[in-house]
Image (spheres, rainbow, N blue to C red):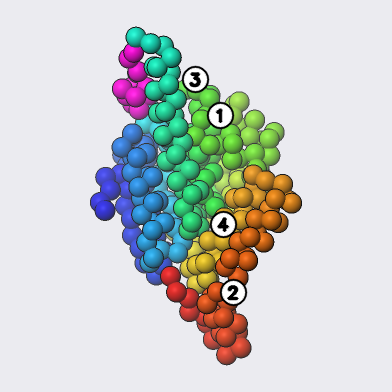
């Protein structure tokens, strides 16, 4: 399908999703949030997609939510009943949360390639990706405190698992910018590179490596890592035992073993 605020290109099993509102620093209006859920749903269903790269057009990755969204009818709920008005606002927030969670729910690994600003809701989006890489001059900022808001789309829930409670608290309370080298040091990103060209070269190489692996196994890895994040080790061991008892004896296992014995590259079904 066609998207107004995103571009989607698929090559060699790699889907590249580009946030395409460069004249607004890739700030996302309401329609873009709704499109984001749809585009990751499409990539999840497409057999020709095994891994996803998420990037931004123009000078920035994403500057978060377009502030005009805060003036939308969904926010400015009119009702004679205060309870019903607040219920509508709750549903609106949950809808926005669902668009970010769609990245996490996508069974394909998602790699964020960050340059320029990754601000507010942009950081919520990046935090929901499986891996993050950036340029050295890229910066990350939990900016909501300066807008009089508590960040509510996932950063405060996901980032503590990546960089620890104290660092998230510092970023959330101060809204300061964390640039590429520091972001790598604290574990927010996997690596940083001097320029966008080198960043995309390295990210594409990583995506190509993943795309060459068994899609069934890659899906199992993503599901297992996300489950383990939110559960105790004992629960995680039960989860992977259940997963592997269902999927271990697959055609991909036979292909992997056969390719190793024959000293050739394996070929997996989508």
Q: What span is in magenta?
A: 68-79
Q: Which mark's residue is nearer the viewer, 3 or 4?
A: 4
Rendered position, 109 above or below 142 = below
Q: Percent position (x, y) of residue 44?
A: 41, 56
Instruction: Please identify, in this view, whether the residue under mark 4 or under mark 2 is nearer the observer.
Output: 2
Disc 2 + disc 3, Cβ < 8 Å: no
**Which residue matches tag 2?**
249
**Position of 210 relative to 253 (above/below):** above
Q: Nearer the viewer, mark 1 or mark 4?
A: 4
Residue at point 34%, 9% (across, down): 80
Q: Mark 1 or mark 4: which comes first in sequence?
A: 1
In whole angstroms, how far apart are the C-alphas of marks 3 and 4?
Answer: 35 Å
Q: Which residue is mark 1?
A: 175
Residue denoted by label 4: 222
The Cα atoms of the two marked residues, 3 and 1, are separated by 11 Å
Q: Are marks 1 and 2 in contact (CB under 8 Å)?
A: no
**Local SS, label 3:** loop
Residue 259, placed above or below residue 20? below
Reading the image, the residue beneath label 3 is 148
């Amino acid at each position: 399908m066609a998207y107004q605020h995103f571009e989607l290109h698929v090559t060699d099993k790699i889907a590249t999703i580009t946030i395409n509102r460069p004249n607004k620093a890739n700030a996302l209006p309401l329609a873009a949030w709704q499109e984001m859920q749809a585009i990751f749903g499409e990539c999840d269903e497409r057999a020709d997609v095994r891994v996803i790269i998420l990037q931004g057009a123009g000078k920035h990755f994403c500057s978060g939510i377009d502030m005009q969204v805060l003036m939308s009818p969904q926010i400015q709920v009119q009702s004679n009943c205060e309870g019903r008005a607040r219920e509508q606002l709750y549903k609106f927030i949950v809808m926005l949360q669902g668009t970010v969670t769609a990245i996490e729910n996508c069974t394909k690994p998602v790699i964020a390639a960050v340059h320029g600003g990754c601000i507010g809701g942009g950081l919520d989006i990046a935090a929901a990706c499986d891996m993050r890489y950036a340029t050295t001059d890229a910066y990350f900022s939990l900016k909501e405190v300066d807008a009089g808001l508590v960040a509510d789309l996932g950063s405060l829930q996901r980032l503590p698992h990546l960089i620890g409670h104290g660092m998230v608290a510092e970023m959330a309370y101060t809204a300061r910018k964390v640039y590429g080298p520091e972001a790598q040091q604290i574990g927010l990103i996997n690596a940083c590179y001097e320029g966008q060209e080198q960043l995309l070269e390295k990210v594409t190489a990583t995506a190509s490596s993943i795309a060459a692996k068994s899609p069934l196994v890659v899906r199992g890895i993503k599901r297992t890592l996300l489950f383990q994040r939110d559960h105790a080790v004992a629960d995680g061991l039960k989860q992977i035992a259940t997963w592997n008892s269902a999927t271990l004896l697959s055609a991909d296992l036979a292909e992997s073993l056969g390719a190793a014995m024959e000293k050739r590259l394996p070929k997996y079904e989508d």
